[in-house]
Image (tube, helix red, strand yellow):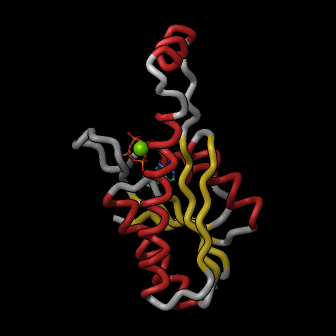
Amino acid sequence: MFSKILCGVDGSEPSMRAARTAAELAQKFGGNLIYLMVTKEFRLTDEAKQYVELEQLSGEPQYVLEEYAENSLREAARMAKDLGVANVRKEVKTGNPARTIVQEADLIKADCIVIGGRGLGDIGSILLGSVSHKVTSLAKCTVVTVR
Ligand SMILES: Nc1ncnc2c1ncn2[C@@H]1O[C@H](COP(=O)(O)OP(=O)(O)OP(=O)(O)O)[C@@H](O)[C@H]1O
Ligand SMILES: [Mg+2]
């Protein structure tokens, strides 16, 4: 039923639960599993660039972000392997999270997108994050929102 599953991971607890559900689905259906984290491009103002150069901090924010992405994706992939999923891939892309997730699903012809209902955002009262909402609206394939 699901032969290619794309799961959005932002490192949050709900996204790691989504990562587990995605792995269980992939295991059950013998499908390929791709974990994707979308990072934002750092755009520094001229003043900030000057500061970064003066303080010799060059590259640091990007490095921290890449390490965060790599750690979260590694954790998800390890969990999937432990659950017996043979084909797991990790990806990091830069851009708008919702649009990039949907574009990637189109590109790789995923038949299912798995995401958490919430992510890193901290507005306690909302039930559905904006990325979940947008992905559900824009995706052409089935979307599983993990609660
Ligand atoms: N940058 C991202 N890269 C990959 N997946 C993401 C990203 N951001 C969110 N997601 C996916 O979408 C799910 C819901 O996150 P979302 O961002 O919609 O909620 P939120 O952070 O609580 O709210 P908001 O971002 O609107 O403040 C996450 O559990 C994750 O599966
Ligand atoms: Mg968010």
Q: Is residue 135 above or below residue 130?
A: below
Image position, residue 75 (x, y; %): 41, 69
**Residue 142 position by quadrant:** bottom right
For the N terminus, the image quarter is bottom right
Image position, residue 51 (x, y; %): 47, 13
Q: Seen in the image, is 24 located left or right of residue 5?
A: left
Q: Seen in the image, is 9 located left or right of residue 3?
A: left
Q: Residue at x 57, y 59 (%)?
A: 36
Q: Residue furthest top?
A: 47
For the C terminus, the image quarter is bottom left
Between residue 92 and residue 19, name the one nearer to us: 92
Between residue 50 and residue 122, name the one nearer to us: 50
Q: Residue at x 35, y 47 (%)?
A: 120
Q: Residue furthest left?
A: 124
Q: Residue at x 56, y 48 (%)?
A: 38
Image position, residue 23 (x, y; %): 48, 79
Count of numbered circles on the image: 0
Q: Residue at x 47, y 51 (%)?
A: 67
Q: Is residue 24 above or below residue 10?
A: below
Image position, residue 94 (x, y; %): 62, 43
